[in-house]
Amino acid sequence: MCGICGIIRFAPEPIDEDRLYRACRAIRHRGPDHTGTWTARTGKTAIGMGVARLVVIDPSPSANQPMHDPAGRHHLAFNGEVYNFRELRRELLDQGISFVTDSDTEVVLAACAHWGTGALNRFNGMWGLAYFDSTEQAGFLARDRFGIKPLFYCTDRDALLFASELSALVELDDWDRSIDEHALVQHLQAGYIAQPATIYEHARRLEPGHVLRFSASGATGPESYYAPPLTGEPFEPEQYGEACAQARRLLSDAVAVRRVADVPIGAFLSGGLDSSIVVSHLAAATPGRVKTFSVGHAEHRSYDETKFARIVADRFGTEHHELLLTGRDIVATIPDVLDHLGEPVGDSSIIPTAIVSEFASRHVTVALSGDGGDELYAGYWRYIGHDAMDTYLRLPAAIRRLLVEPALHLLSSSKSSSLGNRVRQFQKLLRAGTGDALQRHIAWARILAPEAGDLFLCGECAQECDARTIERARRITERMEGRAALDRILAFDLRYGLPADMLQKVDLASMMHSLEVRVPFLDPAVVAHALASPAAFKLSGGLRKRMLIDAYREHLPDPVLEREKMGFEVPFGEYLRGPLRSLFHDVVDRPTVESFGLLDYGAAQRVFEEHLDRRAEHADLLFALLSLCWWRRKT
């Protein structure tokens, strides 16, 4: 696991090695064990690669990067892990290729040299990589199938720049840093910026499952090398029991292959279903006790899951580490996290993710997580919303309009209580009672409430953002004719929201503390099986993750199987009404807000006042505003 950066210049101008060094320093947290750079001129092409290495597999200096083959023809900068590298190594040995290290990086280099981009679909793992063949003066950038690892790039004059984080990309050259206004709107509307966009108009993130080729004449693409199997024949209803058993076998295998490492491994354990599944299989596959890590809230018990984590830890005999946070702990962490970001991030759960990552990094270098389970098996509340809305719309219109809706708008919404959160959820349901399932789903996922729409000086900005997202959703799911609406929604979240929000957040927060996080639920075989499982296997009668619950009914403790889902969050909304109030005022000030030329400062203040007075719950939007303005002031 590493951070990578580089410059490919399609002109006689040499590589600026000082910029390459500065970019490496900007991502030193991703790989504190070794920093290496390499530059060369080959024909019409000049190239520079930099890697900050975190040692996970083969600690020997010969496994450092950038890596080159013995002949000096093939070169690689690699961020990630390929778990099946030993099988690929045997296959390449049969082809007469020799190896001098025990690292997966050397196998990736040899595979790219031997099979070209055809190697990518042979890899089971996560990666952002840059490969170059100096004889052909050609190569490619590539990102893993599901976007677990990031890769940013910029085509700048006669050069292609790339890096694992935007903070490194900006060090490589003086490219145009103009803000992408559409990305800014999406950040405040959805809480994230979806690929291929970034906050910068002229920087892009390589999409999951894509490759970008380059040669002496320039860069082409990007193009897809992988698409999730969305059109296969789903299981029949009578195959439900078999599908449950197969899901459990595949998850067991996925966890087992992710144990490959030469450093200590553990797991995040929230006490939710997905992390508990991962821990159960890791404990079964690991000699000795597995290290598990949880954080909870000492002052806001409605956000605390540690009692469930302890139940799972006791069941599987883990060496459990638990950290209870106070408001002071969380407030003190926020500036460090926001300072770290190369672009604004709108998901406040990056704060507890950073805290648990730092906590885990004191004991292990690699941690397994349950990310991806919600998107594959329908774990979020909004997936139930379609059935709830259909039921609601069967009520007489007069009762809805004159009784239910006025009552809902009078009630206080909040994430801090069960009743307030339920009110908040039903208020979101009413945002999009019409339209098809994808339109409703996108509306429910917004963090920008309709009453906050005047935040944008451009009256059509929010509608344009919605239209773009809906168009993208239709393209992603266009091949899913005949599948249920929920199947299409889950496929959209897998391809769009998961890499843009959850996976990016986890990568940033974990690598900030030099911790590698592996994601068994995004094993290709697990994903293919989940996509082939029909909607009724996942959501039935209001029961989310039905198939996982039944698959693990005799394996996991009942309290974990029967509990309500909780998000991994901090009570940010409550802190805004207390210890973060002055910080928000200081950061989200008139000059900063108005510097974007797109936002109304008065509207931003009205949103804040509504939240303070508990007339509305705007915590998610306000965190996105805080992150945006913090980033603006820093840059």
Image: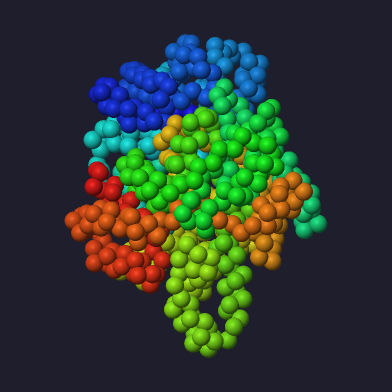
Q: Position of residue 448 (x, y in %)?
A: 39, 64
Viewer can see residue 64: yes
Which residue is painted at 38% across and 69% down in the image?
A: 614
Occupied quadrant, residue 222? top left
Q: Is residue 136 left or right of residue 25?
A: right
> Which residue ends up furthest to the left in the rendered image?
591
Establish if 158 lies above or below 248.
above
| Residue lying at 68% horizontally and 54% vertically, measured from the top left | 559
Provide residue 312's location: percent of width, then percent of height: 66, 44
Q: Position of residue 373 (x, y in %)?
A: 60, 49
Residue that protrudes farthest toward the right in the picture: 238
Q: Which residue is drawn at the image coordinates 51% and 85% (left, top)?
A: 403
- Res. 205 image quadrant: top left
Residue 390 versus residue 571 in the image, above or below: below
From the image, which quarter does the C terminus lie in?
A: top left
Could you tell me which residue is drawn at 68 percent across and 46 percent down?
A: 529
Quarter-wise, where is residue 446 in the image? bottom left
User: With 388 as the anchor, is 3 left or right in this view?
Assistant: left
Viewer-proximal residue, 597 or 14? 597
The answer to whether residue 522 of the structure is visible from this angle is: no
**Is 339 positioned to the left or the right of 65 in the image?**
left
Q: How many marks?
A: 0
Residue nearer the viewer, 567 or 68:
567
Q: How is the image coloured?
A: rainbow
Query: Is 106 located above or below residue 279 in the figure?
Result: above
> Could you tell me residue 219's position as x and y percent?
38, 34
